[in-house]
Amino acid sequence: MTVKSATHEPEVDVSTATQARNIVEIADRLQLRKLPEKAKQLIIEIHQRAKALENVIETITVNHFSPPDAGVEMVERMKATEGGAWTGKELEQKFGLSSANLHRRRKEKRILFWCDAKNDYHYPKWQFNEAGAPIHGIEDVLQIFQSNDEWRVMRYFLGKRQQLDDRRPLDLLREDASDRVIAHARIHAEENTW
């Protein structure tokens, strides 16, 4: 069996660990005192490598297949930031944005959203102005990143950036400094460092 992590770590062949463990068990059953010194050293080395491989597999499994608490907390904070989010129905009632319009914007990466376990879409309130239109510059940044990772995009807008004088891109967009944010997004999109 091969285990591959979600974060592009190298593949790990679990069967290798199993084989090494089997070798160690067989070696344990043998009477090591009857083996030549070279064979003893080889068995000890195999045992150490098997243990190390088991530790690597455990680390990859724990770190990459179960969400860390810090990540879950960060997502929950982003969901609640600046008043939370509207559902598609709320946007339709409040601003007359139809589900077809929202679908097109999602597909074209012109609106920030996330989908919950019930397949309901949520749209962060902070991306809209009072009239229900996206704040100037939001769509530009979304087009630059072309990302399906909504949490990474939200973290970009909501996180302070050293190159922007430790300010959030969202705050600069609200101050009509979209040119600065767009230039910053372009540079970091090219380097994939956003």
Image (cartoon, rainbow, N blue to C red):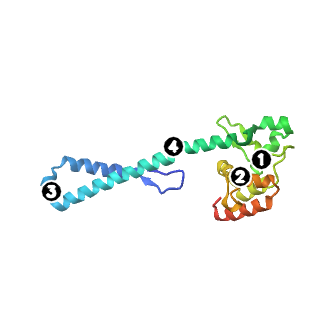
* Three-letter code, disc 3: Leu
Q: CA distance from mark 1 to mark 2?
A: 9 Å
Q: Decide: marks 4, 2 in contact (CB < 8 A)?
A: no
Cα–Cα gap, marks 3 and 1: 72 Å
- Front disc: 3 or 2: 2
Pick whichever of labels 3 and 4 is earlier in the sequence.
Answer: 3
Question: Which residue position holds label 2?
Answer: 157
> Residue 14's spot in the image, x, y percent?
40, 50
Q: Residue 37 occupies which quadrant of the picture? A: bottom left
Separation of residues labelled 3 and 2 (CA atoms): 65 Å
Looking at the rendered structure, which numbered label has been put on residue 35?
3
Q: Nearer the viewer, mark 4 or mark 2?
A: 2
Tell me if residue 152 can be seen: yes
Give the CA separation, mark 3 to mark 4. Answer: 43 Å
**Foreground tag (1 vs 4):** 1
**Disc nearer the start of the sequence (3/1):** 3
Q: Nearer the viewer, residue 35 or 155?
A: 155
Mark nearer the N terminus (1 vs 2): 1
Mark 3: give few (<14), some (14-19) or many (20+) Cα within 10 Å. Answer: few
Say which residue label 4 marks. Answer: 66
Q: Position of residue 88 (x, y in %)?
A: 77, 38
